[in-house]
Amino acid sequence: MPGIDYYELLGVSRGASAAEIKSAYRSLAKVMHPDAGGTSGGFRLLQEAYETLKDPVRRADYDRPAPTAVRPPARPRPRRTGHTGRLRDFGDDPNYTAPRPRVDLGSMDWWNRIDLGARVRYVPATGLGHAPAAAAIGGWFVLLLPLAMPLSPLLLAVWLPLVAGAGYGAFRLVRRYTALARAERAFAGEYDGNTIFGRPGENRRERLTAGLLTEYLTQLPGVRIFHGLAWPGSVFTDVDHALLCGRRLVLIESKSWLPGHYYCDEDGELWRNGHPFRGGGTQLLDGIDRFAELLPWLEIRGALIIYPSRSGEVTCDDDLDFDVPPMTPEQFVREIGEWLADDPSTVDREALRVLVRQVVSEVRVAGA
C-alpha cells in the first residue's frame, strides 16, 4: 500500500531475519486483532506486511527500487506474437471468472466402492458399553441370592464381606459408565451433525474449493471439513481448507494462477510450462510441519488446487508423490478421495477437537 513501509509497520529493520519478522508480527497481532480492540483494516495491513516480508521472493520484489516512470500503464502492455500480429496479454484477466469444476466420477474406484450409509465411528471409544455394567449388577444380585437362605454364622461372616465388596465394585463401574455416557452425549451434541467447520474466504478460488469438498468429499461418511485454520500459535488464516477422515489429514491451498501445465521436479520444486514457477508461493510445507507437531498420531499431506486466472486450461502431472503436489480439481477428488477412502467412516475425536479450535473463520456451518 502506498505510503506504508512494511518494515516500519512491523517495527523491524530492513535487514531483519525471518525469525525477527515472525516474532514482531505475532506480538503486534495480539494488540491489533479486532477482538483485542484493533481495527479490521489495520489488522489486514499487518497481515499483508507479514505475508510479504516472510516470503523471500515477495520480499525481494518489495525491496526492489520502484521504476522511475512517472505514469505507468494501468495494465501490462501486451506484445505481438506469431505471424498474425495479434496482441497477447500474459497477465491476469480481472473480468474472468473461473467456472465451477465438474468431476467425472465414473472412473473413480473409491467412489464406486464406498458405503454411503455406513455408520460413523468415533475413535478412540470412550464408553464402556452396556455389557460390563449390566454384568456387574447381575453378578452382584447373584451373590445376594444365598442370603435369602439360612446360612451358618461362619458362612455368613464370609459371605457378607464378599457381597459388600462386589456391590461396591459394581457401584463404581456403574458410576463410571454413567459419567462416560454423559461425556459421549455432550460430544455428540457439540460435534455430531456438523461436517463443516468455519467458512471459506471471500475470493472465488476458495469458494470453488469449498464447493468441491462439499459436493464430492462429504460422500465419505467420516470426512470433516475445515475452512480457515490458523497454525498453532497464530491468529491468522494460515491454511485455506483441511480434510480429516480416520487418522488422516489433508491441508489444502486454493490458487488462481495462469493457465499452463504445472508439475514438480525431483526436488519438489514447482514448474510451469518447462520453467521454474515464480508466480506465487505456498505455505503448505510449513503447515504440514506445524500440524505434524500438534497432531503427531495423524498422517498428514498437502494439496495445491490450481484454478486458471484467465481463459485457458490448467493441467498437472499425474505424478503426485510429493509433499505438496499441484492438482487440478478432478485430480484432487480422485487422489485425495482414494487416500481417505481407506478408512471412510472413522472420525478421530481428539483430532476433531484440536482442529475445531484452530478454525479462525467466524461462522461454523452445519453439514447436511
Image: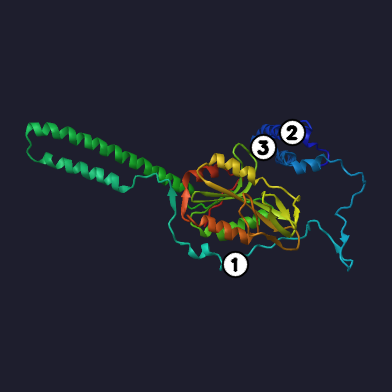
Q: Is residue 193 left or right of residue 128?
A: right
Q: Which residue is mark 3?
A: 33
Q: Are marks 3 and 1 in contact (CB under 8 Å)?
A: no
- Asked which quadrant contains residue 261, the reply is bottom right
Q: Are marks 2 and 1 in contact (CB under 8 Å)?
A: no
Q: Nearer the viewer, mark 2 or mark 3?
A: 2
Q: Amino acid at mark 2?
A: Leu
Sequence-earlier tag: 3 or 1: 3
Sequence-earlier tag: 2 or 3: 2
Q: Which residue is nearer to you in this view: 61 or 235? A: 61
For the residue carrying disc 1, how many other residues have a C-alpha within 10 Å: few (<14), some (14-19), or many (20+)? few
- Asked which quadrant contains residue 355, the reply is top right
Residue 87 appears in the rendering: yes
For the residue carrying disc 2, how many other residues have a C-alpha within 10 Å: few (<14), some (14-19), or many (20+)? many
Q: Amino acid at mark 3?
A: His
Distance from Cα at disc 3 to Cα at disc 1: 43 Å
Q: Which residue is mark 2?
A: 10
Q: Is residue 51 left or right of residue 118?
A: right
Q: Disc 3 on helix, strand or loop?
A: loop
Relative height, residue 50 to residue 204 (above, below): above
Residue 238 appears in the rendering: no
Residue at x 11%, y 33% (from the top left corner): 156
